Image (tube, coloured by chain):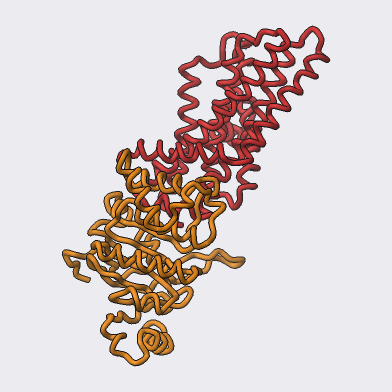
Amino acid sequence: MTGREDAVLTLSEVHKSYRAPGLFGTAVIPALRGVSFELVRGEVAGLLGLNGAGKTTIMKLATGLLFPGSGSISVFGMPPSDMRAKKRVGYLPELPYFYPASTAAESLRYYAGLSGLGGAELDRRVSEVIEKVGLSPHARKKASEFSKGMMQRLGIAQAVVHDPDLLILDEPVSGLDPLAIHDIRVLISELNGSGKTVFLSSHSISELEKLSGRVFIMVQGALVRTVERREWESSSGGLEGIFVNTVKGGGPGGA
Amino acid sequence: MSHLLTALKVAGHSFAENYRSRFFALFLVFAGVLIYSSLLAGVMAVDEEARVITDFGLALMELITLAYALMASASAITREMETKTIYLVLSRPVSRPAYLAGRAAALYAVLASMLAVMALIHLSLLWVRGLAPAPMYLKAVAFIWCKLAVITSAALFISLFSTSAVSTVVIAAILWTLGHFTAEARFLASRSTGAAAVLLSTASLVIPDLQLFNARDLASSVPAPAGPAFLAAYLLLWLVVPYLFSLLLFRKKEF
């Protein structure tokens, strides 16, 4: 894959397998099979796939939490483990968890500090972000007192507190109530409006349809189709129809 | 941001987390009760009251802090992996060596503060009874910390390949026990031949000699088995080597 100047995230022929130790030896389970794609600056791209399709694996590879078996990944032209690349990435894992005894503000201060913020800038960003995600009334509450929706809001807050250029959001609206979904959708749109690149995965086709300019459909670890917004907008079944046809059309090589 | 600064931030947060845990508070209350119970032993000792209260109190302090050290170090990293809070740390510009160093430094600091609090309780008990602490008292407390720091480093390393926190605690506790018989292992190795000699020599090399940090032994041995410079170097070696081995395992660990 040739790299574009405005490429933010590039995966090139990435393979990844997990090893599952068993009674009669170790089984090798392929998670990604030669995945290649590129995200460019300022776009919102979605990852769509069934459970176990490899969405979370891609996101963890892009944040340096996993290492590829083969192929290459670059974030802003650097390896994902490069500290300069990490400084420009905000990551929301699926079902984020926080230190139960820390308050929302304390957690955010810690993460902002680890991302290189300090002094007055840290205070300002933490206050701003708490306000933005609607956690102001709960800033002094401990994470152990938080509901799932509040955890998710705090998760978004820690992902954006250091003002990253690339946001990687794994299931950002998973299990949230409609109001929280709406708020997070508005927040993602605002972030994209301010020039951030957003890469998100979701089981919710309608969410991806509303937010994304492009959607990558994953089947059994392979990227089987890339769908542009105009395609699903002009298709009678929308993105859902395209997704169902693609998945039913077969696994890797089938579509 | 330098690795040192990052390590300090991780250490600061980890230190605070330890203090906030109810487990920690429970330990301190338990320690206070046990140390005051040494009063009974002192009363029974009649003429040797000061010595018995001192020895009994120091032994209890060591055992209580050891129990906390083993449990805290066995779960320091594995718990972050289980709860996935580590995702939010290592997806940021936090190098793995800095993260490991921060977690270890926090444990050393927590143990030092625990010992300081317990020593204060113990000294107050001696003061209330109108007894003077032994001249080697502070040295003994410092040496307890040295032993604990060594076993904490080893337990952190063990926790990275151990299958559970319980097995880490068990292995580290065995190491702690054997560490008090390293001199005997060396002696037996010098008197043995063949495989037994090799086994004992190897054991005396890979198991830390914790008896070196026994203040009473050092004070009563003429000539002293080890000078301050040797002890400092030995402590540093046993902090650095397990850290480097931990780093080897942690460097490519996937989350």
Q: Is residue A253 above or below residue B60?
A: below
Q: Return the residue nearer the eye: B56 or A124.
A: A124
Is A20 situated above or below A107? below
Residue B78 shows in the view: no
What is the number of callouts on the image?
Answer: 0
Residue furthest out toward the bottom: A236
Residue B223 seen:
yes
Q: Is residue B173 left or right of residue B100?
A: right
Residue A172 position in % (x across, y down): 42, 66
Which residue: 69% across, 27% down? B32
- Residue B235, position as x, y percentages in the image: 49, 26
Q: Say left or right for A68 vs B144.
A: left
In the picture provided, is B143 more to the left or to the right than A49? right
Q: Colour of chain B?
A: red
The part of the image, by quadrant, that contains residue A49 is bottom left
Identified at 37% across, 75% down, the residue is A208
Q: Nearer the viewer, residue A154 or A99?
A: A154
Picture quarter with the N terminus of chain B = top left
x, y percent for residue B152: 55, 36
Chain A drawn colour: orange
Residue at 76% x, 11% y is: B49
Residue B39 sits above or below residue A27 on the image: above
Residue B15 horizontal/vertical position (percent) = 50, 37
